[in-house]
Structures are given as C-alpha cells and as structure tokens.
Amino acid sequence: MNKAVHALVYVILAVAGVALYFEMNLFEKKELLKDSNEQLRNCIVKLSSFIEAEDAPVAKPIEVGIDKEPCEAREVDDPQLTQLLDDYHPEYEKANLALLKWGDAQAVQLRKLYDLDADGNKKPDPATPGKFISKGPGTAQELVDKITERASKQNEILNKTRNELANLRGKLQTLAGEYNKLPKEIRLGKIEIEKKEKELEKLTTEKAAVEDQLQKSKAEVEELKTEVSSLKEEVSAAKDETEAVKEDLNKAKETVVRLTNMLKTQAAPRAAATGPATGGGQMTSGDKGNISAVDNERLYAVVKFEDAALDELIGAERNGALPPNEMLVTRAAKGADGKDSRKIVGRIRLRQLTPKTNLVTVDILPDWQQAPIEVGDVVRPD
C-alpha cells in the first residue's frame, strides 16, 4: 500500500513538475500575447491620429477656360473657351481635415473582444450557437472596422488624386506643346514685322520723293495752266481771225462768182464777133491733171491741168470760157488680185481758171465724196 502511495505521490510530483513547466512556458506566451495585443492597440490608437474622420465635402468645379479661337487677323471680344478642369475634383485639395485621434476610451474599447451585457457577461451570438457576439457597438471590432473603412476611403482618395495628377500632367504637356509653338510664331512674326518696317521705311522715303515730285508736278501744272490759258487766248484770237478770214473768203467767193458771170457775159459777144473759139468743154478720156492744193473742210481744191487738157477745155488760143464741167477724182490703188487699179475718191466741178497758168479752182461735190481728196490725186472726165 505504501508503495502504491509512494508511486502515486511520485506520479503526482511528476505531473506537477510537468504542469509547472507548462505553466512557466504559458506564462511567457501569455505575457508575449498580452504585450503584442497592447502594442497592437496602441498602434491602432496612434494610427487614428493620421486617419481622417470624414471625406471632404464635394466642392464646386473650378472653371479654367482656354481660348480655342483660331489666331486670325481679327478681333474677338468674346472668344469660345474650353474648360481645362471640367473633370477635376477640387475637394481633393482640401487639407487639415478632422482626424479620428482616439484616446483612452477607444484604447479600453479595443480590449473588449466581445459584446458584454450589463453584468459584464459575454452575449451569446444568436446566429452562431456556442459563440459570442464579437462585433458591433462597444466592441474592438467596431473600431477596427471604422479605422479600416476610413483608411480604405483615404487610400481611394489618394489613388484618385494620383489619377488627377496624371491627367493634369497630360494636359500640362499638351499645353506646353501648344505654348512652345507660340515663341516660334512670335519670332517669325517679329521677322515679318521687321521686314514690313523696312518696307515701310522704304515706302516712306519713296512717298517723300513722290510728294516732292508731286509738288514739282503741281508747279509745272500751274505753269502749264498759265500756258494753256495763254494758248486759249491765242486760239480765241485765232478763231476770231479765222472767222474774219472765212468772212473774207466768202466775200472773195462771191466776187469770184460775180466775176465769172461777168466773164461769161463778156465772152458771149466776143465769141459772136470773132467766131467760135476752139475747144468747147468736150474732153477726151484719160488723165487730165492732178490736185495741187485742197481744202476738204471748205470743199474746194486747185487742179493743175495738162496743156492738152486745157486746150480741150478753152481752146488752143485760151480765149474760150471755162465750162462748168464735172470731173472724177481718182487715186491709184491695189486690186483684190494684187494688180494696180484706180478707185474713185470724189467728184469736182470746174469753177475758175487762173490767168496765164494751168491752175483751175474747182468745187468739191460732197454728195460724191468717197474719201478726203489728197494732193496728187488724178483728175479725169467721166
């Protein structure tokens, strides 16, 4: 019996030693678990000082317009604008938002793994028999869920902010590319302006020279006006003289007509007394003379007849009266076949013979005139 008791005592002592060994090891693990839990709770409390309690309120979009009107040589008072930040979120810029900043109360709550009743007992979980409620108000899980949610939201805003920065960088690169075109265009514009300024300077010099020449021309014009005025006076005087000459010419024509009639009257008795004179106005065909002087405006000319032609008109003795014969005026010309031919220019009527010459004054018949009669045209009978 004693041996059995001694054996049992030894067994109990061995089990007690083993229990003591495990107790010592479990104590260390317990302290380690306690310290790690305490460290985790403190870390969560400290982390709350960097987590924003709520998101920033949605802000009104920022309007930044870019002039997109083409750069043309025209004034635009109200240009069409394109919004640069139409999809930008200004609320992401909001700083110094309220933080969670948990204290001792939250540190105590983080030690509460289960939801306790008024007596401090763990509440059973109706959804899971045999288990206790470990989430909800008053539990550590509530704070862990809250700080996790806020951290997730803050991370989401951080990623969105990064996207906004990337978008802004792209727009900035585009704007930088468009801006970089402006200096080149401005340089080219300045080169063109300098070129135009040189051209303007040259044109200004030329303008001054032209104005100087214009002043000289004006002076010359004034001189010419004076000369023209003087010439007009001379022309007026010449017209007066011309009118006087015309009047004298008309008087002379009347005198010639009167003398011609007188000669015809005197020649008739003489012819009856001396007998008929040779010649009688009948002329043979062929050229008889040439126009030696002409005035197409006053419709008279002077014909120089050949001796034979004049004999036919007034006789070899030149004592007959000049008949008022009509004759053709012709001019040498080229025919359609290229051969020489004659064309009729007009028709004349004999009027007066200049004594002791072969010159006869004739009247130009306007109804028969085909072209102005010229000196050298040939006279011949019909």
Image (cartoon, grey):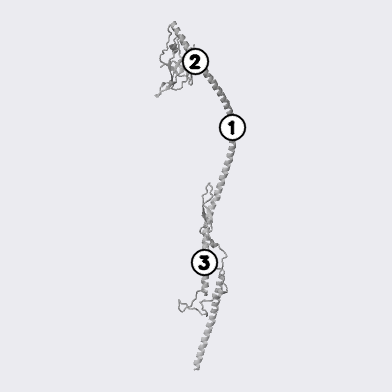
Q: How many labels does the image show?
A: 3
Distance of label 3 from label 1 (alpha carbons): 90 Å
- In which image quadrant can residue 98 be found? bottom right
Name which residue lies at 49% across and 15% down. Answer: 254
Q: Position of residue 269 (x, y in %)?
A: 45, 7
| Closer to viewer: mark 3 or mark 1 | 1
Q: Which of 227 and 317 is in front in this view?
A: 227
**Type of the residue with mark 1:** Lys
- In which image quadrant can residue 339 be found? top left
**Type of the residue with mark 3:** Lys
Of label 2 and label 3, which has the lower sequence position?
Answer: 3
Q: Residues within 10 Å of mark 1 (few under 14, many from 20)?
A: few
Helix, strand or loop at disc 2? helix
Helix, strand or loop at disc 3? helix
Which residue is labeled 2 in the image? 254
Distance of label 1 from label 2 (alpha carbons): 52 Å
Q: Where is residue 370 in the image (x, y as percent from the top left)?
A: 43, 22
Q: Where is residue 224 in the image (x, y as percent from the top left)?
A: 58, 28
Of label 3 and label 1, which has the lower sequence position?
Answer: 3
Helix, strand or loop at disc 1? helix
Q: Position of residue 106 (x, y in %)?
A: 55, 73
Which residue is labeled 3 in the image? 153
Which residue is labeled 1 in the image? 218
**Type of the residue with mark 2:** Glu
Do residues under tags 3 and 1 come within 8 Å of each other at their CB atoms?
Answer: no
